[in-house]
Amino acid sequence: MNFERDWKALLAIVIIILGLGIALWYAATHPNDEDQSTVTSQSAPDASANEIVADFACAKGTIRAVFSDKSVHIVLPDDGREMTLPQTISADGGRYANADESFVFWNKGNTAFVQENGTTTYDQCVTNS
């Protein structure tokens, strides 16, 4: 019986078990973070327990926004476009954008605005909810 060899084998087993434990924990706490930017023709989903619905009154009409943990589903008033946008990095407020960032929905407190291809298309949007 070689103590040094047995000790190294035991250490390798402990490292493997710890690695598996960390991998399982990470998988349970970080579900697939796939790009969720899609354009749909369905109506906005009803809010579930972990979603917040807000109607933002803008000069061009009311934007319906359904906020979930890491995304927002919006319906635009002028042409009925709908899209689900993943949340992106923002220094202040909530910023949601499609993959190429040609469409951005910004939200801070009870206000919001939309930028399309660098141009603000909806502004001064306010909600009471």
Image (cartoon, grey):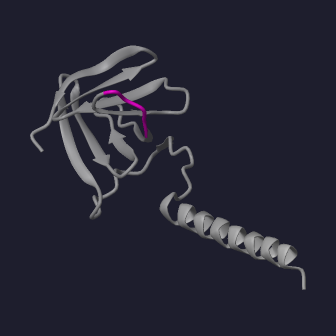
Q: Position of residue 11 (x, y in %)?
A: 74, 71
Quadrant housing residue 95: top left
> What secondary structure prevails in the magenta region?
loop
Q: Position of residue 84 (x, y in %)?
A: 43, 43
Camera-side residue of 107 and 126: 107
Q: Give the percent coordinates (x, y) of residue 26.
A: 55, 61
Span highlighted in magenta in the image: 87-91
Q: Residue at x 69, y 73 (%)?
A: 14
Q: Residue at x 77, y 70 (%)?
A: 12
Name which residue lies at 40% across and 36% down. 81
Residue nearest the observer in this picture, 26 or 83: 26
Rendered-image quadrant of the C terminus: top left
Q: Position of residue 51 (x, y in %)?
A: 29, 56
Location of residue 46 with respect to 118 vertically, above or below: below
Extreme top residue here?
119
Q: Is residue 28 covered in magenta?
A: no
Residue located farthest toward the bottom when viewing the structure as drawn: 1
Residue extending furthest right? Answer: 1
Q: From the viewer's side, name the closer residue of 42 and 92.
A: 92
Count the marks. Answer: 0
> 1 or 34, which lies in front?
1
User: On the picture, is 126 further left or further right than 7?
Assistant: left
Vertical comparison of 54 with 112: above or below = below
